[in-house]
């Protein structure tokens, strides 16, 4: 029973973390048709912004509970500024270009941002463990488990519900869905497609940085953390289907439980578990589990 509980909790926690990171990537692709390699660098910037903000906060001797608001504010503000800046200065000039070219552009942006991170924060590691340790742990069926990890599960659920509400119940969200369905017709109907693109990219960037901010208290924040994350995020969205938010959630669950089961039952296969699931899904569904059907344009 203890082993099953550990696999379930670890799987859910890891899946929630993967979803928070991957949902911004799949949102940007679904609306803008951009496979954003720079997503990993945004994640890393979010972690560094969180560490910097918390360093200032704790140096001022302020209450522990307020640190979580600081983490969220740092991710949202930094993501908003960086997202709007990148979309307005770089991506807007390349709208409508070939998707392969956009991959190369965002890869170049990723490399530049990685160097920028080293110039600003240096190559040393940063530790800010207090938000992770402060809530303590609870016992679930006799297994001690960190409250912080359980909170990440709750945040992922709220985030998924919030995105669903945004896309189906708000005017901007419905306009975004219209742009996804047909960009040219949406523009012809008077929708400001450029504005929708700016909102989408800023939101995707904020989500990436939120993932980095939530991860920062659990790890040593170094300049290389974005490389591993972008590979995992791609695996998740490929499993679920590029551009599908429900697919990102299901893909994260598949990857999370595969990784948790391998860690507890066969640790030597941990590195391959997620990619084995991806290969199996693609063998059955080459475009992912929830790939959107697209019409052929003549």
Image: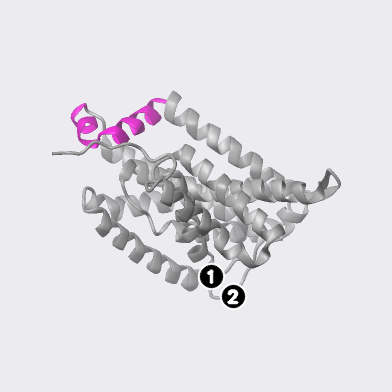
Which residue corresponds to the image point at 71% horizontal and 45% vertical from the top-left? 150
Q: Residue furthest bottom?
A: 123
The image's colour scheme reads one colour
Which residue corresponds to the image point at 35% horizontal and 63% vertical from the top-left? 107
* Location of residue 272 by image quarter: bottom right
Q: Looking at the picture, tell me which residue is in the foreground, 250 or 49.
A: 250
| Disc marking residue 121 | 1
Question: Is 131 above or below relative to 184?
Answer: below
* Location of residue 154 by image quarter: top right
Which residue corresponds to the image point at 49% horizontal and 28% vertical from the top-left? 165
Q: Looking at the picture, tell me which residue is in the foreground, 269 or 22.
A: 269
For label 1, the crowd category at 10 Å Cα-Cα, with few meaning under 14, some 14 to 19 and many 20 or more, is some
Indicate yes or no whether the magenta region holds residue 180: yes
List x then y, in percent, for residue 49: 55, 58
Q: Residue furthest right?
A: 142
The answer, for residue 182, to whether it is visible in the render is yes
Q: Kindly state the secondary structure of the residue where label 1 is placed.
A: helix
Q: Which residues are magenta?
A: 170-189
Indicate yes or no whether the magenta region holds residue 169: no
Location of mark 2 (residue): 124
Which residue corresponds to the image point at 43% horizontal and 47% vertical from the top-left? 284
For label 2, the crowd category at 10 Å Cα-Cα, with few meaning under 14, some 14 to 19 and many 20 or more, is few
Work out how far the residue at label 1 is from the one at label 2, CA to CA, in angstroms. 8 Å
Dominant secondary structure (helix, strand or loop) of the stretch shown in magenta: helix
| Disc marking residue 68 | none
Q: Kindly state the secondary structure of the residue where label 2 is placed.
A: loop
List x then y, in percent, for residue 87: 33, 50
Mark 1–mark 2 contact, CB under 8 Å? Answer: yes
Q: Looking at the picture, tell me which residue is in the foreground, 124 or 33.
A: 33
Q: Quadrant of the C terminus?
A: top left
Q: Viewed as shown, does residue 282 lie left or right of 53?
A: left
């Amino acid at each position: 029973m203890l082993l099953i509980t550990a696999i379930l909790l670890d799987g859910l926690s890891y899946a929630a973390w993967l979803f928070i990171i991957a949902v911004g990537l799949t949102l940007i692709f679904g609306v803008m048709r951009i496979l954003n390699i720079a997503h990993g660098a945004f994640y890393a910037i979010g972690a560094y912004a969180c560490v910097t903000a918390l360093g200032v906060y704790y140096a001022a001797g302020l209450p522990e509970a307020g640190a979580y608001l600081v983490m969220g504010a740092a991710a949202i503000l930094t993501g908003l500024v960086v997202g709007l800046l990148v979309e307005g200065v770089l991506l807007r000039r390349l709208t409508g270009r070939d998707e392969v070219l956009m991959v190369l552009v965002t890869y170049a942006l990723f490399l530049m941002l990685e160097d920028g991170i080293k110039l600003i924060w240096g190559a040393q590691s940063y530790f800010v463990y207090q938000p992770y340790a402060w809530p303590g742990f609870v016992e679930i069926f006799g297994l001690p488990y960190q409250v912080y990890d359980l909170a990440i599960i709750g945040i992922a659920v709220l985030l998924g519900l919030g995105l669903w509400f945004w896309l189906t119940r708000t005017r901007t969200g419905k306009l975004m869905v219209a742009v996804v369905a047909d960009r040219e017709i949406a523009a012809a109907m008077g929708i400001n497609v450029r504005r929708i693109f700016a909102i989408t990219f800023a939101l995707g960037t904020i989500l990436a940085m939120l993932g980095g901010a939530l991860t920062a208290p659990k790890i040593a924040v170094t300049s290389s953390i974005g490389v591993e994350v972008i590979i995992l995020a791609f695996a998740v969205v490929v499993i679920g289907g590029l551009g599908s938010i429900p697919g990102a959630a299901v893909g994260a669950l598949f990857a999370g439980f595969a990784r948790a089961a391998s860690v507890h039952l066969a640790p030597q296969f941990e590195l391959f578990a997620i990619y084995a699931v991806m290969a199996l899904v693609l063998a059955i569904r080459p475009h992912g589990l929830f790939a959107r059907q697209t019409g052929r344009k003549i």
